[in-house]
Image (cartoon, grey):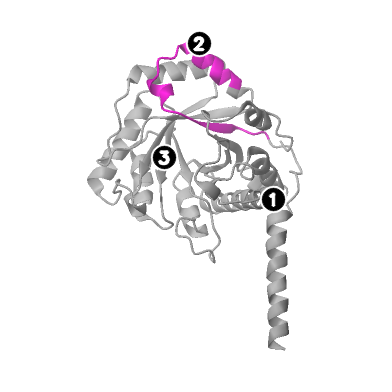
Amino acid sequence: MVKKTGKIVAGAVLLLLAWMLLVPPTGRPAGPVQPHNAVWLDRYWLRRDMSVSDMEHEIARMVALNIKTLFVHAGPFNPDGSIPEYDPARILQIRAAAANVRADVRVLAWLGGLNAAGGGDLDLLRADIRTRAAEEACRLQERGFDGIHLNIEPTPTGDEGFLLLLEATRACLPEGAFLSVATNLWGPWWLPNHLLFSDEYLRHVSGLVDQIAVMNYDAYAVTGPLFRRISAAQTRAALRAVQAANERTTVLIGVPAYPTEGGLRHWAPAESVPNALAGIDAALASVSPAALRRFEGVAVYAGWTASEQEWRSVGEWHGL
């Protein structure tokens, strides 16, 4: 009897795994959703000699894909909380180029950093480092950016230093300035991975910012259907978190547009733009109208690696 029961359980587990790996979720939003997509852009936008007309051309191409938020890399934080040198005049050139294309394009300074809580060199529990980092971010906004996009990795779920940095940055930004954050993948409580954000931590982060952009990639998805399931789960969890946390917060879901790197951590044939979009559609088909209103769009990672086909997939996103 025991052996028979064990075989039944093993068979059920195998069927469940096969279903997750091979059977994709399906569905499309019941009502219209107007996407306001985003894209991560490399540091050369801020440091490279590119004419305003060339920037306008690139921005116009992206706006045609419903991309209305630009995360412009302003450099990673140094271990002391400072950032690399930049030309303030360049910020105004980028902002002018965006305004010439479309008045409502939002241009945010993207600031990364290697979190000491995850083995990096940026110790956000030190008040002096955290204060300097927040001041550097706010100075970028003062010089022309519409706001700040913080992307601190790796951040373990529950990390206090990351929350303190968000609070410090919000405190020094003027009213009306936009604060966005890139978040880790969400994970259910039973997955023993401290780099997956818990429901509670995702809610806490969401309550401190205007926008979360879920880094929906590097998920070790070995099949397309599995990545669709992961994308759907990320979308539902993020919308659930912002609904519970802050009525102003909106959600972007990252879509991976870069070649395979790191082995199975990012297997591009499975972790693709079309599979991400299909998974997001499936989630949007199952959430409440109130949650659907909090969905802002997708965020393309990255602007400097996306192929023409991947850009086209975003532009032709049939679910929206």
Residue at the image position 34 percent from the left and 54 percent from the top: 117
Residue at the image position 32 percent from the left and 50 percent from the top: 116
Q: Is residue 53 visible?
A: yes
Image coordinates for residue 170, horizontal then vertical, percent: 38, 41
Q: Is 38 covered by the magenta stretch?
A: yes
* Residue that mark 1 sits on: 225
Q: Nearer the viewer, residue 284 or 268?
A: 268
Q: Quadrant of residue 57?
A: top right
- Is 295 on the left-hand or right-hand side of 189? right
Q: Is residue 177 visible?
A: no
What is the span of residues highlighted in magenta in the rendered image? 34-61
SS class of the residue under badge 3? strand
- Is 275 on the left-hand or right-hand side of 42? right
Image coordinates for residue 296, horizontal then vertical, percent: 60, 38
Disc 2 residue type (three-letter): Ser
SS class of the residue under badge 2? helix
Q: Nearer the viewer, residue 266 or 49?
A: 266
Pointer 1 local density, CA inside 10 Å: few below 14, some 14–19, many at least 20: many
Disc 1 residue type (three-letter): Pro
* Residue that mark 2 sits on: 53
The quadrant of the picture occupied by the N terminus is bottom right
Image coordinates for residue 32, horizontal then vertical, percent: 73, 37
Marker disc for residue 150: 3
Pointer 3 local density, CA inside 10 Å: few below 14, some 14–19, many at least 20: many
SS class of the residue under badge 1? helix
Q: Quadrant of residue 141?
A: top left
Verify CB contact (< 8 Å) between mark 3 and mark 1: no
Q: Nearer the viewer, residue 104 or 217?
A: 217
Task: Measure the alpha-carbon separation of dots 1 and 2.
Answer: 42 Å
Residue at the image position 55 percent from the left and 24 percent from the top: 104
Verify CB contact (< 8 Å) between mark 1 and mark 2: no
